[in-house]
Amino acid sequence: MIVRTVLKHKGDRVITVASTDRIDHVCRVLSDNRIGAAPVCSPEGALVGMLSERDVVRALARTGESCLALTAADLMAQEVVTGTPEDSIDDIMVLMTEGRFRHLPIMENGTLAGIISIGDVVKARIAEIELERDAMKQYIATG
């Protein structure tokens, strides 16, 4: 299975935040949309980073509530690993495991085409395994 298939079922709507958004606002965006991370975009719409719940929690632990006045640019990961719609779910799983992150922006022709979470990867793998299981059952029953 490839990422494009997952995005087709999931949808390509991506909640982003601006690099200038304050962390208190970013927290509301994450909470209101029930997401664990958001791509950070420049005013021109370019992907410039990723900001996750973990980033906010670490900042809170370090500096306390004063971190809520910082901006997304202050806390975001600036070196963002991305995928493409043609990447396999297996390759995405390896990237996420090795990189120890749970959200991967998907880029197509230089623009943000979607985002894949570890939950999306797990669902896709389970669907693949169930399909293989059903095919095996059918083969055994008719063989």
Image (cartoon, helix red, strand yellow):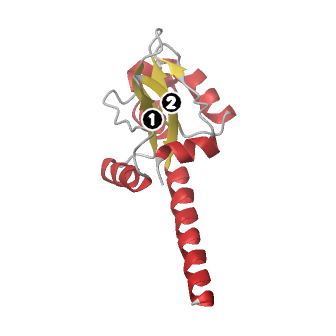
Q: Tell me: 37 left or right of 96.
A: right
- The answer to whether residue 111 of the structure is visible from this angle is yes
Mark 2, Cα crowd under 10 Å, few <14 / some 14-19 / many 20+, is some
Residue 17 badge: none
The residue indicated by pointer 2 is 113
Three-letter amino acid code of the residue under disc 1? Ile
Instruction: Indicate left or right for 109 with 26 as reference.
Output: left
Of the pair 113 and 50, the residue shown nearer to us: 113
Q: Are marks 2 and 1 in contact (CB under 8 Å)?
A: yes
Q: Secondary structure at mark 1?
A: strand
Q: Residue at x 65, y 39 (%)?
A: 34
Q: In the image as oriented, which residue stretches furthest toward the right?
A: 32
Q: Tell me which residue sits at (39%, 34%) in the image.
A: 62
Count of numbered labels shown in the rendering: 2
Q: For residue 35, what is the image quadrant?
A: top right
Instruction: Give x and y (percent) for residue 129.
Output: 53, 69
Q: Is residue 38 visible?
A: no
The Cα–Cα distance between marks 2 and 1, rounded to whole angstroms, is 5 Å
Using residue 81 as the reference point, say whether residue 19 is left or right of it: right
The numbered mark, 2 or 1, whose residue comes first in the sequence reads: 1
The residue under label 1 is 106
From the viewer's side, name the closer residue of 78 and 74: 78
- Kind of residue at disc 2: Ala
x then y, percent, for residue 20: 48, 13
Callout 1 crowding tier (Cα within 10 Å): few <14, some 14–19, many ≥20: many
Q: Is residue 50 above or below residue 36?
A: above
x%, y% of residue 128? 53, 64
> Which of 96 and 138 lies nearest the eye of the viewer?
138
